[in-house]
Amino acid sequence: MEIDYRIYEHPIIRFKRGRRVRFYFEGRVVEAYEGESVLAALYAIGVRVFTWSKKLGRPRGAFCMIGKCSSCFAVVDGVPNRRICIEPVREGIRVERQRGLAEIPRVEDVEPVETVNIETDLLVVGGGPAGLKAALTAADQGMDVVLVDSHYRLGGQLVKQTHKFFGSKEYFGGKRGFQVAEELSKKVLEHPRIRVYRSSEAYGFFDNKVVGVAVKYPKPLNLVVKADAVIASTGAMEKGLLFENNDLPGVMGAGGAQTLMNEYGVRPGDKALVVGAGNVGLIVAYQLLQAGVKVEALVEIMPRIGGWFVHAAKLRRYGVPILTRHTIVKAIGENRVEAAVITRVDENYRPIGGSEKKLDVDLVLISIGLTPDTRFFSQAGAVLKWIPELGGFTPIRTRYLETSIENIYVAGDASGIEEATTAFIEGEIAALSAAIKLGYGSKEAVERREKLLSYLWDEYRLSPVVSRARAGKLKATVSEEEMMLIRGKKFGGV
Amino acid sequence: MIRASVAIVGGGVSGVFTAHYLVELGLRDIVVIEKNYLGSGSTFRCATGIRASFTSREHVELMKYSVDEWLRLSNIYGFNYLRGGYVWLLSNEEELERFKQYVSFQNKHGIPTRIIDPPTIKELVPPIREEEVYAGVHDPLAGKADPFKAVLNTAYRLMEKGVRFYTRTRALRLLVSRDKVYGIETNRGVVVADNIVLATGYGTKELLKTINIKIPLENIPHHALITEAFKEAFKPLLVDWATASYIVQTFYGGFLMGTDIPEKPDTPLINRLRFLYKITRVWTRYFPWLSNVNILRYWTGYYVNTPDHHPILGPIEEYENLYIAAGFSGHGFMIAPATGTAIAHWIIDGKPYPEIAGNLKLERYRKGRLVKELAVFG
């Protein structure tokens, strides 16, 4: 019987599938569509176990789906430890799963990679909402821009947003996230002053002046970028949750399920439990319904949901139980999730004995929070601060979003977990700041930046739903004078 | 105020092992202070190699002792230590002739090194490209250990025995009166002790400045990287002599490698592209498959060098109760058992054991008695 989890009917998205591609998976032929990742193609045909752990040989499935965790390592054409969630399907490639630690690669003949040195005014690392907006803003100010993204398509998490932005037209009110992603990506790719490198990972900041970028496709290249300013809009990563069997295939980050459904048009399962009722949990639960997945329950350990009420209302209309003061106890199953146990908790978040309930699910989505992806800043030596309201570590910055490393800016979720709208605004603020500092900005640019800062801090962030993020971002922001002192200090350093 | 019989400044392998040997000799009233977290100075950054195959009497004697002790300590504290050997890769006749002299010196001192040919190298290092090797030197008793557990397992057991550890406690200056150093002022208060040991790595020079003691130490940035983990591919630590590069597979499975690039003393630690270009060029020549292996981390740390590339150990002339354990010039990890033993005996007996450690006091520079070594390789 042919297993096919691909979605063919969706209320919002029309999945444009590319031409047919065939590759080999452990000896058998797999049919996929150009544009899919290897993992999505395998998931579509029912593969759920992608690797086995090193010590105990436990089966592991996909978790983040965006190349940031290590759940889906496989051997591709003899090379181990490839993240197949961001590996594009190609005709004839051979994919094998890994059991524990891999043997060293069997590949002998290797072509040395060419190093290309380029110069630019602004390097943008990460082409999600903040990065796309930053690149366009800077280019419009007359700057030469290079944008790099580790994925093979631009848009970051925006490509998975199916609901419409609310608010003004300026911030895409009335448009769906994936439409905005398409629009902005197109503008960026067509802009004469923006050079784009996709499937390209910025691997570090060196000698206090250049950024190394590993370009993977179409031709491997070591791109060394000397930029007068860098905006690192590197986004965020899913947080995991501790519970028994939290590593079973079928337990995945909510964002991961979103990627499968909305980007690749693959149904992540049949019956789901969603853990966490912040915006991500609420939105993804609704998207599961749109993709034809039954949502048995949404559990939230706090006494109240954390997200916008409007998202919760949609779920209630469909009869999805939203259980506050509840959490997951364990997942049950041998090679994949077969059931999950939830429980009610008291004011101290401790399980109330006797209130356990077993749910018949094959999917457990974890949406308990994201944490900023600070790897680039950490390697570059920026001062990071642990701010729980923002999801974890994040670089400290001035109000103009410049970090403790001069001319390196932060924008978007990397500056603290917030929203797509704030990502757009921060991307613009960072780009205007870089432009102004380097002499590109006009009087209008300075005025525009003040207007944006005012809107962000004195209007948008006053809403109760983002008040926690606002408090967090206040903690992360230091004055220009303080920043100069911090830059001058020898930071016990080593 | 904290009081102790012995205060050890520095919570790396040198400081922690010194505490171990003091406890073994019966002394427990010990305080160890560490400015960040245990091992965060140089120990957790090191190449993890351990060998007695040096070319000076001092290094050979102290390392022969240390090699035996590594086995004993690894059993007591339950950390990984393997005598997987070292292989020096030589690239021409001239190097081979020179190494024949070193091997001769080593054999005379009971170190079983031997010259080996390419097929033997291939046996010891199966994934190596045999065409690239000319000749080699093998030290079968050399090896590697897990620096993390060596420090942490030991420290935790010492804590159970009553040794007090204060981390995130930074020594700001030494406190002196007459001919004694009576304590250390830290950012969290004063520590008073009868004996003070400075196992402070790259911070030693600055700390001694606070009591106007000059010490010929230079902090030189060095670079290392580690790859993702694989099943065990080869056991020995390899040294490419011509390029001053090394590679070793750690117990966790990653390949740890380093090489020398030009750096000025006492400059900040910065990641450099030049290091990456050199290290990848060197080791992909011998292991082309490394081209398909991901680098997980690249870090920079300090070698603390002395003029004769030998450690500075023991008491100083100006203050009778201050003991130095620094300037290991890239070999601090491997020599830590000898360091700890020597300092512990100095404090308790008034003289070091092994005795030859007495040749390494700070005063040797003033007296013109620098140690001579045939070959210096970090």
Image (cartoon, coloured by chain):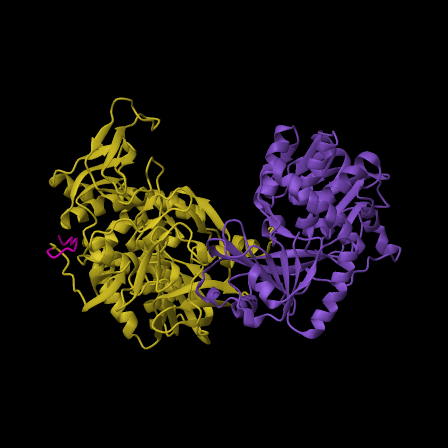
Position of residue B138 relative to residue A123, above or below, is above
Nearer to me, A223 or B287: B287
Q: Is residue B107 left or right of residue A405?
A: right
B251 drawn magenta: no
The stretch drawn in magenta includes residue A7: yes
The x, y position of residue A77, in whole percent, is 35, 65
Q: Residue furthest top?
A: A354
* Residue drawn 37% across the image and 44% down it: A57
Classify residue B321 as left or right of residue B82. Answer: right
Q: Which chain is yellow?
A: A
Count of picture labels: 0
* Viewer-nearest residue: B213 or B137: B137
Quadrant of res A360 = top left
What secondary structure is the magenta-colored segment mainly?
A: loop
Percent position (x, y) of residue A490?
61, 54
Nearer to us in this view, A140 or A290: A290
Residue A414: where, in percent of width, then height? 39, 54
Can the viewer see residue B182? no
Which x, y percent locates residue A310? 18, 44
Q: Which residues are magenta?
A: A1-9
Residue A228 placement, left or right of A428? right
Vertical comparison of B194 with A71: above or below: above
**Residue at 19% in and 47% down:** A269
Q: In the depicted view, which residue is nearer to us: B45 or A207?
A: B45
Q: Residue furthest bottom?
A: A192
When asked about the image quadrant of residue A463, the answer is top left
Which residue occupies the extreme right position in the image? Answer: B367
Residue at position x 39%, y 42% from top?
Answer: A56
The chain shown in purple is which? B
